[in-house]
Image: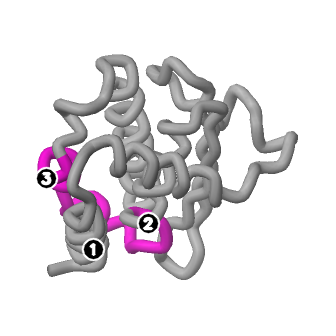
């Protein structure tokens, strides 16, 4: 099991403590509230994720062969989804990101419990993470 897969399993196990989706939504919102804001000069069109109904800015940096992500949204639930993505993918090797599928989406039931626009936004953020990882691998 690589680092990305282990992080996904931790998130799946953590969400297993909640009995219902209202508690899971509240937990997502709470996670999103803890995200540090991005600097105003990072909230640019170049860092904006297309395909999200809300505004989402994503910044990727490579440090010592690992991708570090920072991101923020103007929507509470989306910020929570970002917090999950950062826990799973940030500070992980690009090759491991590319070797791992986003199993947590199905395991958590996010497909059934997010609105279609939020699901599209989640897919867009996952695609952006994979693109950053592909670019990092190609650059080596």
Q: Could you say which quadrant of the image residue 18 lies in?
A: bottom left
The image position of residue 33, as x and y in percent, is 63, 52
Disc 1/disc 2 C-alpha distance (Å): 9 Å
Q: Name the secondary structure under disc 2.
A: helix
The residue at 34%/50% (across/down) is 24
The residue where tag 2 is placed is: 87
The residue at 57%/37% (across/down) is 76
Which of the two labelled residues, at mark 1 and mark 2, occupies the earlier sequence position?
1
Q: Nearer the viewer, residue 81 or 76?
A: 76
- Can residue 139 be seen here? no
Left or right of 55? Residue 108 is left
Q: How crowded is mark 2: few (under 14 residues within 10 Å), some or many (20 or more)?
A: some
The residue where tag 1 is placed is: 10
51 versus 78 height, above or below: above
The residue at 49%/37% (across/down) is 78
Mark 2 or 3: in front is 3
Q: Residues within 10 Å of mark 3 (few under 14, many from 20)?
A: some
Disc 2/disc 3 C-alpha distance (Å): 16 Å
Q: Give the range drawn in magenta.
A: 89-108
The image position of residue 87, as x and y in percent, is 44, 66
* Quadrant containing the N terminus in the rendered view: bottom left
The residue where tag 3 is placed is: 107
Disc 3/disc 1 C-alpha distance (Å): 12 Å
Which of the two labelled residues, at mark 2 and mark 3, occupies the earlier sequence position?
2
Q: Is there a contact, CB below 8 Å, between mark 3 and mark 1? A: no
Q: Nearer the viewer, residue 96 or 116?
A: 116
């Amino acid at each position: 099991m690589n680092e990305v897969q282990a992080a996904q399993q931790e998130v799946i196990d953590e969400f297993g403590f909640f009995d219902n989706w209202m508690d899971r939504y509240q937990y997502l919102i709470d996670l999103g509230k803890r995200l540090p804001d991005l600097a105003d000069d990072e909230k640019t069109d170049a860092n904006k994720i297309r395909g999200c109904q809300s505004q989402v800015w994503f910044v990727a940096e490579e440090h010592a062969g690992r991708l570090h992500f920072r991101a923020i949204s103007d929507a509470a639930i989306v910020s929570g989804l970002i917090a999950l993505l950062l826990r799973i993918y940030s500070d992980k090797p690009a090759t491991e990101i590319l070797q791992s599928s986003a199993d947590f989406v199905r395991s958590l039931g996010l497909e059934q419990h997010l609105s279609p626009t939020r699901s599209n936004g989640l897919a867009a953020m996952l695609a952006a993470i994979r693109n950053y990882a592909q670019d990092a691998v190609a650059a080596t």
